[in-house]
Amino acid sequence: MSQAKKPRLSDVGQLGAVRGCHWGEVTVLSLPANIGAISAISAWAPDSFSDDGLAQGNLSHIAVGTDTGCTMLIDSNKNITTLEGSGGPAIQCLLVKSATATTVLSAQSSSLPDTIACDSDGRVSVYAMGQMFARNIFSAPISAIALDTNPNSPSAFIVGDLSGAVTACHAQEVLWRAQVAIQEPVSKSERLRPQLSDSMADPGISGVCAVQFPDSHGIFTNYVLAAGGDCKVQVLSRGHPVLAVPTPIPCSAMSAGYFIDSVSSRCTAARTCKSQAIIGDEAGRLFVLDDFELVPYAQLDYPITQVLSIPLRAFSGLHGMDVVVCATRSNSVYILHDRQVVGTYLADFWPVSVDVVGAFSTTGPCIVVARNTTVDGGSCANAVHVIPLELDLH
């Protein structure tokens, strides 16, 4: 049975504002049969972690995509809205965001958020008010997606694909496109290291996120970060590469937020924007990219598959460093704060995909975990688990 594991003493060390965590009652959302295995999820709640402006009172939603191309929304009343039926390419990644005036259909009502589904055929499909609104087709499967933080394009999002390209776009318009990772020949020494050679030869984008770093005058400027198989984090400005930050091995996941006290004198202590990025790799290491510098954050027990952030104010109403949620290649989901592991969620299955949401039939943040189960006869009995997360604060 799923449980919360107390952090080991070696993990915890000297605790900061958060001394531990515990879990509320799990809500299990069972999925219809014959839609395939879950391949991606994305969760959203109005006014949860961001100031994106939907009126309070709307329901939280979880988007689910499967390997048969099915895409659906489940709200916090457990109602299911099917956006796309089975029979298409596998869904690779999903993003749920606030309905915007740029999606004309969703401007008519605010009952459903916008959903963006990216698949293995390179299609980026935008659904508004439960209907197909727009679809762009790229030349390679989409492997990563994130919201853009640029205030000049509030409805934009960023996608990375398996050709090594990063694209910023609206529902019906491509803003810019950059080729940031190009496959290079693998050297003889790398071929002798099979555990690294495959990932280092892979030009695909494994993670993207949007951040705001300070310039020489301390003014925050918008950048897009992208990681692939080339042991670098590429920093882009308006689609143009400006810097490549080397990493020990290829990165597997990243997320924007505020995670450590800044190493830069140009950054103030009061953080009101996503001014840092946390990056995970296959060795279980976490780093923070702060003002173009890579700073060690923590070492976990397993390879990192996803890294997510929750603002501390979502728990306490106070400003402080974000809480980090890490999915790994195991049944463990780690909770960290201020470089320390403060708890671990142990599932009785290996999560397919993990996300976080500001609330889902509760008053506080939750982690959302996808589970695939094969029953007798080969049919699927898949579900999404929603687990309230509560912090033990000093």
Image (cartoon, helix red, strand yellow):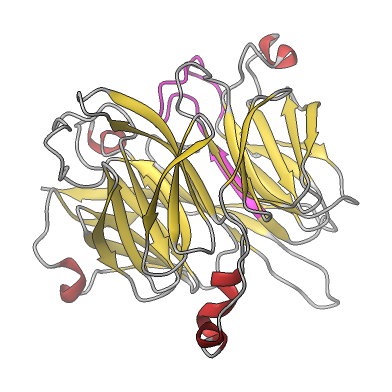
Classify residue 197 by image quadrant. Answer: bottom right
Q: Can the viewer see residue 41?
A: yes
The magenta-colored residue range is 40-59
Classify residue 37 by image quadrant. Answer: bottom right
The location of residue 10, given as percent across then percent down, is 17, 75
Residue reaching furthest right?
87
Q: Can the viewer see residue 305?
A: no
Q: Is residue 329 magenta?
A: no
Residue drawn at (56%, 27%), measured in percent from left and top?
Answer: 59
The location of residue 88, given as percent across then percent down, is 87, 50
Residue drawn at (66%, 39%), measured in percent from left and top?
Answer: 74
Classify residue 145 by image quadrant. Answer: top right
Residue drawn at (19%, 52%), measured in percent from left and top?
Answer: 338
Of the pair 213 and 132, the residue shown nearer to us: 213
Of the pair 51 and 394, the residue shown nearer to us: 51
Asked if residue 259 is positioned above or below residue 295 in the image, the reply reads above
The location of residue 335, given as percent across then percent down, is 32, 58
Give the side of residue 18 with respect to residue 92, left or right: left
The location of residue 188, given as percent across then percent down, is 56, 86
Q: Is residue 44 magenta?
A: yes
Give the side of residue 29 with respect to residue 231, left or right: right
Residue drawn at (69%, 69%), measured in percent from left and top?
Answer: 373
Give the side of residue 194 with respect to residue 325, left or right: right
Labels in figure, total? 0
Of the pair 133 and 141, the residue shown nearer to us: 141
Asked if residue 16 is positioned above or below residue 155 in the image, the reply reads below
Q: Main secondary structure of the magenta part?
A: loop
Asked if residue 264 is positioned above or below residue 254 in the image, the reply reads above
